């Protein structure tokens, strides 16, 4: 891995056996990474990074404003997202079951924790709530799209992924969904489910794959654009 610096911003350069360059601004610390083809010239990579400098700065600043770069403290008054909407976090101490309650009408997420709970403990409780909500939503989406697409998902899982919104194991018939999708709009979650299920038909991102996406979900590009604006852009 190499490091280049553009306008004071360090950018990791990772060369891989790929055709195109990919640019990432990575949570939780706002690190910037470019993956590039093995034989691509350094000058081409540097020019690409320079052309995306405004985008890089925009998203690094957004992470900082949301408290992501330095890490959320999971304290009352913070803003946390769920299904594409921002909610005010309220933290309450309890001797009963630690839990999360969503108050849609007030735009609040209530987090009930032990009085001396750590940041990591609070983070884990909220993350497990996100995970449970996704696991409630995903089966219905799979069932809906199995009927439309004529494929069968044998199992699914939810996990944290730094650079992908989802993955598909074709041999096992299993799809994985990024935990962060609990924070995005329902349309984004449905798009990723359909995207990974399409890989059960076509392994590669080629004409056949995108033809299937167009047929099954004609507005999929809108959801992709929303996700690209928050995590990754491709050239």
Image (tube, rainbow, N blue to C red):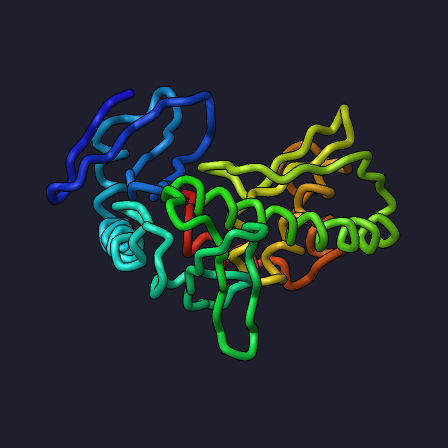
Q: Identify the residue at horizontal 35%, vertical 42% (top origin).
A: 28
Report x, y in % for residue 39: 35, 20
Residue 90, compared with residue 176, is above or below; it is below
Residue 198, compared with residue 172, is above or below; it is below
Q: Identify the residue at horizontal 62%, vertical 54% (top origin).
A: 189
Report x, y in % for residue 187: 62, 62
Q: Nearer the viewer, residue 155 or 21?
A: 155
Q: Give the residue furthest to the bottom.
A: 105
Residue 198, compared with residue 223, is above or below; it is above
In this rendering, would 57 be left or right of 133?
Answer: left
In this rendering, would 38 be left or right of 195?
Answer: left
Q: Give the residue furthest to the front.
A: 95
In this rendering, would 182 be left or right of 61?
Answer: right
**Residue 222 visible somewhere in the drawing:** no
Q: Nearer the viewer, residue 195 or 177?
A: 177
Report x, y in % for residue 140: 79, 55
In this rendering, would 4 be left or right of 158?
Answer: left
Quadrant housing the N terminus: top left
Q: Nearer the viewer, residue 91 or 115?
A: 115
Report x, y in % for residue 76: 36, 62
Q: Identify the residue at horizontal 25%, vertical 53% (top origin).
A: 64
Number of marks in picture: 0
Quadrant housing the C terminus: top left
Q: Identify the residue at horizontal 28%, vertical 38% (top origin).
A: 31
Q: Quadrant of residue 128?
A: top right
**Residue 20 visible somewhere in the drawing:** yes
């Amino acid at each position: 891995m190499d490091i280049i610096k553009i306008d004071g911003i360090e950018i990791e350069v990772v060369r891989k056996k790929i055709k195109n360059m990919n640019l990432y601004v990575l949570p939780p610390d706002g690190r910037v990474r470019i993956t590039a083809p093995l034989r691509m010239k350094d000058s081409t990579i540097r020019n690409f990074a320079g052309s995306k400098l405004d985008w890089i700065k925009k998203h690094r600043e957004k992470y900082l404003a949301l408290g992501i770069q330095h890490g959320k403290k999971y304290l009352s008054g913070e803003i946390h997202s769920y299904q594409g909407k921002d909610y005010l976090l309220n933290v309450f101490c309890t001797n009963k079951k630690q839990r999360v309650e969503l108050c849609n009408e007030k735009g609040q997420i209530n987090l009930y924790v032990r009085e001396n709970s750590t940041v990591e403990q609070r983070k884990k409780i909220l993350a497990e709530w996100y995970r449970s909500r996704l696991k409630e939503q995903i089966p219905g989406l799979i069932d809906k799209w199995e009927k439309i697409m004529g494929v069968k998902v044998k199992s699914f899982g939810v996990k944290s992924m730094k650079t992908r919104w989802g993955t598909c194991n074709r041999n096992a018939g299993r799809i994985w969904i990024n935990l962060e999708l609990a924070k995005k709009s329902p349309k984004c979650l449905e798009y990723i489910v359909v995207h990974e299920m399409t890989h059960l038909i076509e392994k590669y991102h080629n004409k056949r794959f995108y033809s299937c996406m167009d047929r099954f979900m004609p507005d999929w590009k809108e959801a992709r654009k929303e996700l690209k604006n928050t995590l990754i852009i491709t050239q």
